């Protein structure tokens, strides 16, 4: 397959690197010092599943030089998705599939508005990765898992070739008949972990242990569960306990990318996580007081990171 990784950050770099290592025709869309390092030294991935280096990696910052591909893996931050959708148009031909792997539940629909619903499938992944240095990805936690499927829940025939590519690369991947349920299950996990972690500035080993913050995690997960049910998403009855168990299985030092971005003063996925819970809850007539508190508490730091608010010296 010819595959473009649009956004070679922690997620895109890891999955694209594994696919390239397995012999797939992968081009990495990156920019700045990260792009130059990949061109000069290859893409280095340090992983719990085994370190590797993609030598002579095909990398560019111009999708027009690539042309149509079979699959676009979208690895940018969630708040960058609409702009990325417009920029990746040269990669999308008549039979191209676009697979977003962002945190949250809105990215597939944002891409469908730009590229056409027929080109977009739903996707999600579980793993803790980040850019350690230009040209260098580090996989620091969780056994990688990836799932994808059709947005209209039709038979996922078009996804089988993609599944074959991931499986041949030794990756744990699944094609699901109801990708929305799986995406919302991850939303319960990541938006709660991110919000509580960002407000407390504490790693999950602390927030899941201190009784008060464990209750906060449970309340945050429950709110998203109620929103999903109100929006007719088919989630299991034990969804809240299942997500808590997953949080209990994380390394104690684990933090979410939204939390790290906010703590480091960078633009974050606040709008697509805490903000989305509040917004989607309001649309469904479901109150979300915990997420509303976290969103309001974190919004000044988000606005400062985006240059629209300044804190007095």
Image (cartoon, rainbow, N blue to C red):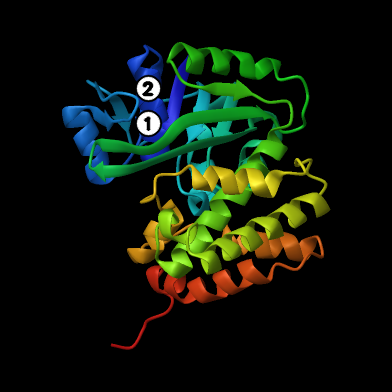
Q: Which type of secondary structure does the marked residue at label 2 adopt?
A: helix
- Left/right placement of residue 181 relative to residue 20 reads right
- Left/right placement of residue 96 relative to residue 15 reads right
* 19 is higher (above) or lower (below) than 32: above
Name the residue tied to disc 1.
14
Distance between mark 1 and mark 2 Cα atoms: 6 Å
Residue located at (44% from left, 31% from top): 143
* Residue closer to the observer: 303 or 111: 303
* 50 is higher (above) or lower (below) than 183: above
Bin the neighbour count of mark 1 within 10 Å (Cα to Cα): few under 14, some 14-19, many 20 and up: many
Res. 86 visible in picture: no
Can you give x and y, in whole percent of width and height, for residue 134 in the image? 22, 42
Q: Which type of secondary structure does the marked residue at label 1 adopt?
A: helix
- Examine the image and state in which quarter residue 27 appears: top left
Residue located at (75% from left, 42% from top): 235
Are circles 1 and 2 on residues that touch, CB within 8 Å? yes
* 290 is higher (above) or lower (below) than 100: below
Name the residue tied to disc 2.
18
Residue located at (32% from left, 32% from top): 60
Residue located at (40% from left, 27% from top): 16
* Residue closer to the observer: 100 or 61: 100
- Examine the image and state in which quarter residue 174 appears: top right
* Residue closer to the observer: 14 or 66: 14
Can you give x and y, in whole percent of width and height, for residue 266 in the image? 36, 62
């Amino acid at each position: 397959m010819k595959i473009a990784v649009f956004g070679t950050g922690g997620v895109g770099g890891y999955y694209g690197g594994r696919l390239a290592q397995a012999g797939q025709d992968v081009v990495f869309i990156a920019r700045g010092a990260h792009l130059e390092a990949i061109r000069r030294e290859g893409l280095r991935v340090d992983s719990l599943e085994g370190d590797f280096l993609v030598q002579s990696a095909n990398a560019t910052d111009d999708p027009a030089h690539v042309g149509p591909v079979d699959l676009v893996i979208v690895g940018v931050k969630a708040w960058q998705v609409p702009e990325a959708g417009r920029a990746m148009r040269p990669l999308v031909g008549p039979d191209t599939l676009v697979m977003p792997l962002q945190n949250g539940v809105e990215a597939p629909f944002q891409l469908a508005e730009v590229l056409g619903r027929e080109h977009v499938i739903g996707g999600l992944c579980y793993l803790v990765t980040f850019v350690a240095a230009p040209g260098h990805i580090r996989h620091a936690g969780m056994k990688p898992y990836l799932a994808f499927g059709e947005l209209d829940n039709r038979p996922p025939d078009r996804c089988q070739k993609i599944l074959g590519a991931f499986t041949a690369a030794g990756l744990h991947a699944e094609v699901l008949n109801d990708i929305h349920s799986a995406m919302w299950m991850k939303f319960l996990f990541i938006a709660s972990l991110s919000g509580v972690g960002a407000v407390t500035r504490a790693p999950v080993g602390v927030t899941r242990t201190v009784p008060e913050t464990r209750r906060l995690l449970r309340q945050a997960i429950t709110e998203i569960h109620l929103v999903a049910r109100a929006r007719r998403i088919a989630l299991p009855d034990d969804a809240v306990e299942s997500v808590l168990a997953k949080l209990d299985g994380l390394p104690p030092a684990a933090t979410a990318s939204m939390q790290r971005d906010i703590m480091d003063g960078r633009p974050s996925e606040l709008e697509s996580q805490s903000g989305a819970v509040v917004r989607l809850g309001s649309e469904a007539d479901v109150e979300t007081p915990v997420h509303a508190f976290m969103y309001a508490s974190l919004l000044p730091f988000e606005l400062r990171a985006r240059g629209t608010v300044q804190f007095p010296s």
